[in-house]
Amino acid sequence: MNGSKKREVCAQLRRFRQRFVQSPGSVLAQLFTARCLGQWVFEACGPWRERVYGPLGTLMLFVEQVLSADHSCQDAVALGVSARVGRGQAPCSLNSGPYCRARQRLPLKLIERLGREVAVRVCAKQPTAWLWRGRHVKLIDGATVSMPDTLDNQAHFPQNREQKPGLGFPLARMVAVVSLSCGAVLEWASGACEGKASGETALLWTLLHRLERGDIVVADRCYAGYFMIARLMSLGVDVVIRQHQRRHSDFRRGQRFGVRDHVAIWRRPKCPAWMDEATYARMPEHLRMREVRAGGWTIVSSLIDVRAVSKKDLLELYRSRWQVELDLRSIKAVMQMDILRCKSAQMVVKEIATHLLAYNLVRTVMAHAASHTTLLPRQLSFKGALQVLRAFEKNLRHCPRQRLVFQHAHVLGAIARLRLPHRPDRVEPRAVKRRPRPHSLLTSPRSIERQRLIARKQKIMTAALR
């Protein structure tokens, strides 16, 4: 990398750090240096030509786009023009075409690498007090997102079979591994909702090698299959999962620890159609699993030492699984990822990765704010933190260096005051009070309905001119 490119990367990285409250000398600052970031960009993009929308500048605008309330490309271009004028540079065109083409050139590997590196490094720098008895607890769950109804999206992410052609939207499924302590998305995988190997367990199977020995996985009963648990245990990962609805727990048998608390022996089932014989032969013939009935659930776990982990501890661990539901809701509802905007399958995957990168950056700021207090990151409001970062965006980006520490202190202090109320047993009905507008449903493709309206309008105009 030549001198001019290196200076530009350093300047862009400095502004990026300012934007996300990365003050020098703080505990969670300096997540990546200019040298390593420049190396990652060079490895992913190769030698690039200096232009208005370079790789790093385009990525930063992409992150700002998914963090904004508008989410449009035109808004991102206007933000880029405003930033150039604020730095004393000549304004570029407001045409969104060059920016959209720059996003297409942006390598997916670079976005995914940055998203994972941010999550891994903030977890590595977090205090030990945030962990569960010194161990990392990782929550797993899946979600679906929709996207524009284009031919390319339909080819890679087909819509639900029950929907008629032209009346549905392509759907993508995503499985995420989230840290319980700081809320960052550590790993994720996405794919279609239809077809072979498109289920949540199939997507999770591709992420298992990224888990670390000593982790504790907390998940719903969708992941409570014998082979999934056996694979996790072979990696040195403990599990706390709700019992699958098809498996019956007989608490009269096995090694009993107390009321509805025992260790049962699970026998290896027959080889499924999706597994090859070599993999099946490596699976253990039986598993020793602890089964507990508490809180209205039957929980299974590989933590069988009753003196180290009580029945109440297992219940509290499984109840913490609800945090991943709130995290996915924050990503889909607060960050508006439930309806994607890109019209090609390639850009859809990039848009998902950019949303998760931006989410991890906000989580990093929340962890930074919590590290200055006695609070945990989970006690702070994600939506409130995002609103504060949006409000201070221009101040942070263009703040003089001598006043940057004070600006960061104001932002972190504001986020630390946005504490969530403690409501452990709160319940709400899954229903809405506000009625939708009484529009009729679209029962045929929009193009056909549009032609029908045009023909009707011409008919009325012809009759009026007679």
Image (cartoon, rainbow, N blue to C red):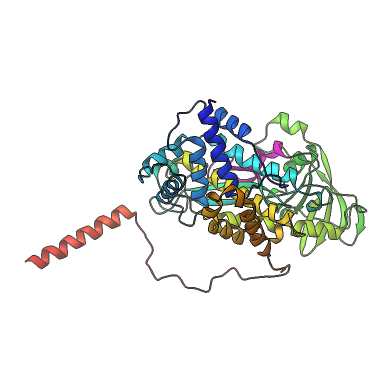
Left or right, 82 with reference to 124: left
Place residue 450 in its image quadrant.
bottom left
Which residues are drawn in magenta? 186-212
Place residue 226 in its image quadrant.
top right
Left or right, 241 with reference to 150: right
* Residue 76 point in image, percent of width and height: 44, 48
Return the residue nearer the eye: 300 or 416: 416
* Residue 223 point in image, percent of width and height: 70, 48
**Where is 428 relative to 451, above or below?**
below
195 in magenta? yes
Instruction: Kindly identify the residue that appears in the image at 53 percent across and 74 percent down.
Output: 433
Tally of numbered discs:
0
**Residue 3 shows in the view:** yes
* Residue 420 point in image, percent of width and height: 68, 65
Q: Quadrant of the C terminus?
A: bottom left
**Residue 202 shows in the view:** no
Left or right, 1 with reference to 323: left
Left or right, 370 with reference to 102: right
**Which residue, as the protein is rendered here, is positioned at the far left?**
466
